[in-house]
Image (spheres, rainbow, N blue to C red):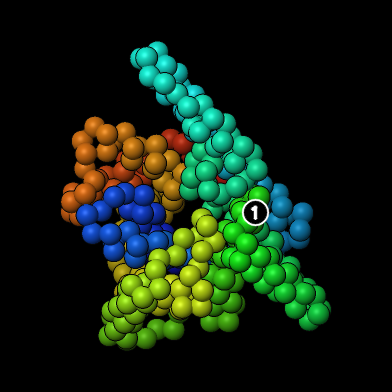
Amino acid sequence: MKRENWIDWAKAVGILFVVMGHSSYACEDVGRMIYMIHMPLFFFISGYLFKTDKNYKELFLNSWKSLCVPYIFYNLLFAIFTICTRMVKLLMGSDVDWTFSFFNPLWHSLLGVANGIFDGPTWFLLALVWCKFFTYALHTNESVYKKVGLLCLWGILFTVRILCGIQFVFAIDCALAGFIWFKIGHLIKLNIGRFIYYPSWCWILLVFVGFFVCYKLMQINGQCNYIMADVKGGLGIVATGMGLIGFFSLCKLLNGVNSKIVLRISKASIVIMCVHMLIQGPLESIIHYQGNIIITIVGDIFIVLVLTAIYPIVQKYVPVLVGGRK
C-alpha cells in the first residue's frame, strides 16, 4: 500500500506531542491541550490503517508479534533498568521503597493495568489489540443482532468503568475509550478513502476553528486522560473531535511537503513512544530543561531526533522491540 504523506506528518507531530505530554511546561494549557488529542490521534490513525482482510488466527498472530511482544520486552527492559538504578541507590546509602518502585509496577505490568506499569506509554499497545479485534468482529459479522450486542457490551463495560472507577486488566478500559477514535478512523477509510481535496483555505479555517473550539471546551470541561479512560463525557468527546479536525487539517496542509526526517520519525514512532521517558527523566535531572516553553520544546524535539537516529539499529539488531516492522 502506498504511503500517505499526511499520515506520516500526523505520526511525526503526534509522537512529538506524546513526548511533550510527559514534560512540564510553564503554561499548563500546553500539556492539557496535548492530552486532549495526542492518544486519540494515534487511535484514529491506527483505525484508518487497519485492514480486515485477515482471519482471526492471522489477526491474533499479527497483533501478538507487532504489539504484545514489544509490550513484554519494553516492560522487561524497564524492570531491569529499575532494579539497576535502585541497587545503585542502595550502594550509595539511600533507602529504596521496593514495593512502590518495583513490585507494584511489576504486578501492574503483568496484569496490564495501564496506570502504573514499568513503561507507562506501552498501555497503548495492549489497548490497540482490543480495538483491532472489536473492530474486526463488528466489520466481519453480518448479523445485525450480534453487532448490536457487541456495541451494547462496549457500552456496558465503558459505563461500568466510568461510574465505578474500576481499572480493567490488559488495558481493556483504555481500549474502550480509544475504540471511539479507532472506529471513526476505520469508518472514514472505508467510506471516504483519502480525504476530499478541499481548497487550502478550507483546511486553514478548520485548523483554527478545530483547535479554538477544542481549547475553549477544554477550559470549560477539563482535560481528557485516556490512560484512565476519562473522555470527559460527551462534551469531552466533542472537544477531542474538534481538536482532531484541527490537527488532521494541519497535516493535510503539510501533505505536499515531503520530508525524509518526517518519514523517519513516523517509522520510529513505536521506539519513541516506548523509550522517551527513559531519556526524559535523566535529561531533566542533568540540564533542567523543562519549564520554559521554547527550551522545553527544543529538548523534546532533541529526544525525538535521538530516538529516531537509533531506530535503524534497534530495527536491525533487536527487531522484537519494533514488532517486526519494516
Occupied quadrant, residue 129: bottom right
The structure residue drawn at horizontal position 41% and vertical position 46%, both measured from the top left corner, is: 272
Is residue 317 shown to the viewer in this render? no
Occupied quadrant, residue 249: bottom left
- Residue 64 lies left or right of residue 245; in this view the side is right
Occupied quadrant, residue 6: bottom left
- Residue 1 lies left or right of residue 285; in this view the side is right
Q: Where is residue 288 in the image (x, y as percent from the top left)?
A: 21, 39
Is residue 104 shown to the viewer in this render? yes
State the SS at label 1. Answer: loop
Q: Position of residue 154 (x, y in %)?
A: 68, 69
> Can you say whether 236 is above or below 303 in the image?
below
The structure residue drawn at horizontal position 33% and vertical position 72%, both measured from the top left corner, is: 219
The structure residue drawn at horizontal position 57% and vertical position 31%, both measured from the top left corner, is: 103
Q: Where is residue 240 in the image (x, y as percent from the top left)?
A: 43, 72
> Can you say whether 209 is above or below 131 in the image?
below
